[in-house]
Amino acid sequence: MNRRFILVILALCCSLMLYGCANHSKDAQWGAVCTVYLDNLPKEYNLLPLELREKTTITFSISNISLGRVYRIALTEKNGYRQEVDMLPGNYSVSEVYVSNHSIMPLSAAAQAENILLEQNHETHLAVSLADPSALAQTIQLNTPTPEILQAAPYSRQVQYAGTVLNLNSIPQVMSFPDIQDKRLSSGETYEIPSSSHSGVCLIVKNTTTSIISLNEATFVGVKFTNNNAVFPGGLTIGSALKDVANARSGLLGTPSYCTGSPLIGFSLNRSALVYLDHASGDRLSLTIDSSSSVVTSISYEFDVYQ
């Protein structure tokens, strides 16, 4: 990258920052303050991994077209899900609230008013509420690791799902999966069948023959989980931090057997996977790491792979 190009980029960044500051910098003189806060976050929320909480952001905007003002609101773990905004006096509309957390734990929220009035030298409060905080609390409680799963061996084929410890081999019997009639698999091809009864669970099946076969003839070879209802031995779950899993000395699983995907975790490139292979059983545990963060976003456990 040449020096001239770098200077151009820096100049553009500076001009954008100055524009952003100038846009609302004088609004505080009117004393019209809007305090936005999340009013019903259950105490159980703090039991979630910090890295998962840090990826949860509640965003929306408060706007007045005639005044030419749009205020972006972001409620996060860092600001305690509370933000004070200096605004121009006037009537404002509140946009739809969006909750971003990488689809690890589906959440929805809404502001308690669609329109608000900001007055000079006056503080206006705007509450934002989760749609079902009791369900969130219950989900978190059910997914708190039990002593049984914490003490289980990493390759014991045990998983705690929604509070119940299961053997992975029993998943096809305890959960429902669709019978897909029109899908065929080539020799060696694998396919993931999403559960019709349990969100975020997929059967992994494989054509272990030398012929083309229908999907319902494939061999069940593993299970994939994509939401945080599943807890693996030691407390490994969706949302676990990379440093807590893969640290060579203190990680739950230590150094991976090998990795796939991009080696640049956290730079919004391709997703990466940490792969752990048990040489005794041949079982394989694969953890997908999100491209823009350093947390586990899916866990796959496959039987008798040996590679």
Image (cartoon, rainbow, N blue to C red):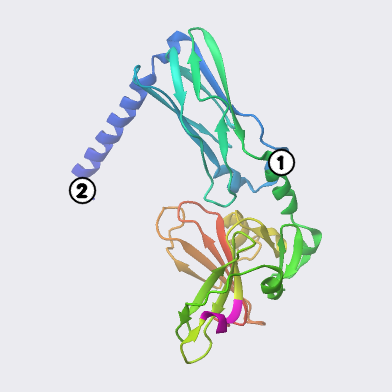
Which residue appears at 55% of the width and 42% of the height?
A: 56
- Is 68 in front, or is 254? 68
Q: Is residue 173 above or below residue 295?
A: below
Q: Give percent across and percent down for residue 196.
A: 60, 64
Left or right of residue 261: residue 235: right
Separation of residues labelled 2 and 1 (CA atoms): 56 Å
Q: Quadrant of residue 167?
A: bottom right
Q: Is residue 94 magenta?
A: no
At label 2, the amino acid type is: Asn
Q: Position of residue 178 (x, y in %)?
A: 58, 70
The answer to whether marks 2 and 1 mark residues whose Cβ atoms lie closer than 8 Å is no
Which quarter of the rendering shows the C terminus? Answer: bottom right
- Of pointers 2 and 1, the one earlier in the residue sequence: 2
Q: Which residue is mark 2?
A: 2
| Position of residue 138 measured from the top left corner of the image (x, y, whole percent) | 73, 47
Q: Which mark is residue 134?
A: 1
Q: Nearer the viewer, mark 2 or mark 1?
A: 1
Residue most extreme to the front: 181
What residue do we see at 53% from left, 74% from top?
Answer: 180
10 Å crowding of disc 1: few (<14), some (14-19), many (20+): some
Residue stretch in magenta:
215-221
- The amino acid at mark 1 is Ser
- The foreground one among 62 and 263 is 62
Q: At 48% across and 14% down in the image, what residue appears?
A: 118
Across and down, in percent, residue 229 comes to: 66, 57
Magenta segment: does it hold 220?
yes
> Image check: 12 left or right of 77?
left
**Eyeballing the image, is 267 above or below 118?**
below
- Neighbours of disc 2 within 10 Å: few (<14), some (14-19), many (20+): few
